[in-house]
């Protein structure tokens, strides 16, 4: 036997006087642990991808909410472009007007002036399935209803906030 010679199973090495364990420093021992690094690297990559996708998803959801994408208003209700949702409250069953099943209250903020926002809502709520019932110029309130279901009624209150406008929508259906 030559010193350094491996046993047929590769587990022992002859040191010149006796057989000693050959696990440390041999190519077969190093090769057997390579899979651990591949698995750890793959897990790290999956974790990084999950965090990135989660962050993108949450950002998209927040943006959608802030720009009126997730709203209690009907899908055909006029949406003022560039307005940011400040808050939203939806009430069902009790706490709504008699004959109604749902009440939606939203507050939006726009950088546009009151005259521009007023013109938009007067035009859009006066067309399609919506109709302006009254417009009070002094208070900035528009009362409207759905043409196909007159029990669906509401108000849009437009309040000047510096150079911008606060839009308060209250819809009962």
Image (cartoon, rainbow, N blue to C red):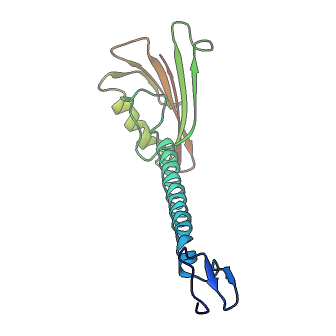
Of all residues, the one furthest to the top in this rendering is 99
Q: What residue appears at the point 58 percent right and 21 percent down from the top-left corner?
A: 91
| Residue 138, image x, y percentages | 52, 31
Which quadrant of the structure image shows residue 124? top left
| Residue 35, image x, y percentages | 52, 67
Which quadrant of the structure image shows residue 36? bottom right
The answer to which of 99 and 143 lies nearer the viewer is 99
Does residue 79 appear to the left or right of 72 in the view shown?
A: left
Of all residues, the one furthest to the left in this rendering is 128
Of all residues, the one furthest to the front in this rendering is 1
Residue 30, placed above or below residue 125: below
Residue 23, placed above or below residue 43: below
Does residue 111 appear to the left or right of 126 in the view shown?
A: right
Q: What residue appears at the point 34 percent right and 32 percent down from the top-left corner?
A: 123
The answer to which of 163 and 155 lies nearer the viewer is 155
Across the whole image, how many numbered discs are drawn on residues? 0
The answer to which of 171 and 136 lies nearer the viewer is 171
Q: Quadrant of the N terminus?
A: bottom right
Q: What residue appears at the point 41 percent right and 18 percent down from the top-left corner?
A: 145
Q: What residue appears at the point 63 percent right and 77 percent down from the top-left corner?
A: 23
| Residue 52, image x, y percentages | 51, 58
The answer to which of 71 and 55 lies nearer the viewer is 55
Does residue 112 appear to the left or right of 10 in the view shown?
A: left
| Residue 140, image x, y percentages | 50, 32
Residue 21, placed above or below residue 160: below
């Amino acid at each position: 036997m030559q010193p350094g010679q491996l046993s047929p199973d590769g587990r022992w090495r002859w040191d010149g006087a006796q057989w000693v364990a050959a696990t440390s420093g041999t190519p077969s021992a190093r090769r057997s642990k390579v899979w651990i690094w591949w698995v750890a690297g793959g897990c790290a990559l999956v974790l990084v991808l999950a965090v990135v996708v989660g962050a993108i998803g949450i950002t998209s959801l927040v943006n959608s909410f802030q720009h009126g994408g997730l709203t209690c208003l009907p899908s055909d209700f006029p949406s003022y472009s560039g307005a940011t949702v400040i808050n939203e409250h939806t009430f069902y069953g009790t706490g709504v007007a008699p004959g109604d099943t749902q009440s939606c209250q939203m507050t939006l903020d726009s950088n546009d002036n009151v005259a521009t926002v007023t013109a938009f809502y007067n035009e859009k709520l006066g067309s399609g399935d919506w109709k302006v019932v009254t417009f009070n110029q002094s208070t900035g309130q528009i009362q409207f209803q759905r043409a196909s279901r007159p029990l669906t009624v509401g108000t849009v209150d437009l309040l000047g906030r510096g150079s911008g406008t606060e839009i308060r929508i209250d819809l009962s259906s």
